[in-house]
Amino acid sequence: MNILAVETSCDETAAAVVRDGYEASSDVIASSCEAFVKYGGVVPEIASRKHLEYLSDVCGKAVSDAGMTFGDIDAVAVTYGPGLIGALLVGVSGAKAIAYALKKPLIAVHHIKAHICANYIESPMLKPPFVGLVASGGHSHIIYARDYVDFEILAKTRDDAAGEAFDKVARVLSLGYPGGPLLEALAKNGNDEAYKFPRVKFPNYDFSFSGVKTAVINELHRAKQANADINKADVAASFQKAIVDVLVDNTVSLAIRKKTDKVVMAGGVACNKTLYEAFAKKTKQHGLELYCPKPRLCTDNAVMTGCCAYFMAQQEEFADMGLNAFATVPL
Ligand code: KG4
Ligand code: ZN
C-alpha cells in the first residue's frame, strides 16, 4: 500500500510516500523557517502563504522521488490537527483535491499520533504497549500506547510546551530562531549547576515550564540591573538541565507506574542530545528499553504522517470530503 502523506501543521511543507507503513519511499520537506528568523517565531499568516506556494511542487516531488506516478498512490493522508489553523487548511484542501482526483481514500491524521509513529519507522520491531514523551514546539504530552495508534494521554503541560520554553529562553538570550538547537549548542560550554532553576512537579506528572522560563528572565534582569556579567552558556546549560530533569523523571515514573518495559521519545525536542543521554541513563537504571527516532523524523515531516495513516487504514479509519482542519483536537 503506497500512501501519499501531507503535513502542513506549522512551518514545514512536507510530503512523503510511505510503503506498507514502514518504508519511506520518499521524504520531501520545504521549510519556511528562514522567513521567521527576523520575527523570532512563526507568523501563522506567512506560514499559510508559504504552504500554498510550496505544496503542489512538494507533493509532485514526493511522488517522483519515490519513482512513481500519482497512479501508483493507493491512499492520501493529511494532518488535520492540532496545529496552526491556516497552515493546516492548506494541507487538508490540497490532500482532499488529490484524493478526489485520484478517486482514492483520504486518511485524516492527528499530528501528535504521527510524532509517536516516527518510532515505528525508525524501529520496525517496536510493539505497543509503551509509554511515550512527545515534546515539540506546541505540545508536551506523556502518552500510553495501548495499540499502534490508540493512545491515552497520561500527563501534559499546563502552560508552555518544552520546545516553546527552549525557543523563548533562546530569544531572551538573543540566540536566534529556532531556539532549541541554538540553545543546546551554547549549553555544551556551560555549567548546568551554575543556576538553580525550578523544577515544577505535580502529583499527576503534568508539566509546567512557564516558571522556569520566568526564572531565567528574572535572572537576566537582575544581572542587567546590577551591571553584572552573565555567562550565557551557564544559563543555557542550567535551564536545559531543569527541563530535561522533569521530562525524564515524569516519563520514566509513568512508565514504571504503567508497568511497561519500553519508553519512546518523539517531537522536535527529542533531537536534544542531553535529553537523550539523560533518558538513556535513567531507562537503563530501571531496565527499560529506550526508542528515539533520528532527528529528521523527530521534527515535523510527512513520513510519520504516512506511517500513522497506514495503521489507521488497517482499521478502516477513513475520512470523507467533508474533512476540516482543527487547531486543537483531542488525542
Ligand atoms: O516537532 P517540531 O518540529 O514542531 C512542532 O510540532 O512543534 O518541534 C519544533 C520544536 C521547536 O520548539 C524547537 O526549538 C525544538 O523543537 N527543538 C529542540 C531541538 N531541536 C528542535 N529543542 C531542544 N533541543 C534541540 N536540539
Ligand atoms: Zn510537530
Image: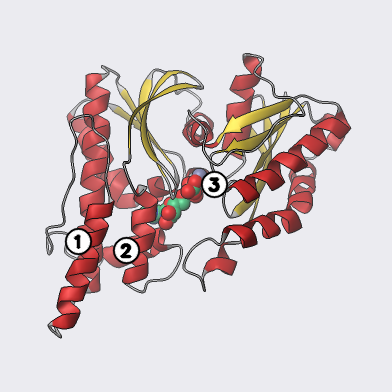
The tally of labels here is: 3
Seen from the viewer's position, the closer of residues 228 and 265 is: 228
Mark 2 near mark 3, Cβ–Cβ under 8 Å? no
Q: Secondary structure at mark 3?
A: loop
Q: Which residue is mark 3?
A: 300
**Nearer to us in this view, 91 or 24:** 91
Instruction: Using the rendered view, name the quadrant where residue 167 is placed.
Output: bottom left
- Find out if the beta carbon at label 2 lies less than 8 Å from the nearest ligand 1 atom: no
Q: Are marks 2 and 1 in contact (CB under 8 Å)?
A: no
Question: Disc 2 or 3, which lies upstream in sequence?
Answer: 2
In the picture, the disc for residue 272 is none
Which numbered mark, 3 or 1, is in the foreground of this view?
1
Dot 1: element: helix
Corner quadrant of residue 179: bottom left
Q: Nearer the viewer, residue 158 or 271?
A: 158
Q: Position of residue 161 (x, y in %)?
A: 37, 47
Real-space Cα separation, disc 2 to disc 3, in angstroms: 21 Å
**Residue at 80% in and 44% down:** 64
Instruction: Name the residue rendered at 57%, 38% in the picture.
Output: 81
> Mark 1 sits on what residue?
215
Amino acid found under the numbered disc labelled 3? Asp
Task: Give, as a three-letter code, the residue at label 2.
Answer: Val
For label 2, the crowd category at 10 Å Cα-Cα, with few meaning under 14, some 14 to 19 and many 20 or more, is: many
Which of the two labelled residues, at mark 2 and mark 1, occupies the earlier sequence position? Answer: 2
- Distance Cα–Cα, label 3 vs label 1: 29 Å
Question: Relative to residue 315, is residue 155 depicted above or below?
Answer: below
Mark 2 or 3, which is nearer the eye?
A: 2
Horizontal placement of 254 versus 29: left or right?
Answer: left
Identify the residue shown where x is 27% and y is 41%: 207
- Disc number for residue 169: 2
Q: Cβ of disc 3 within 8 Å of ligand 1?
A: yes
Distance in Å between CA atoms under marks 2 and 1: 10 Å
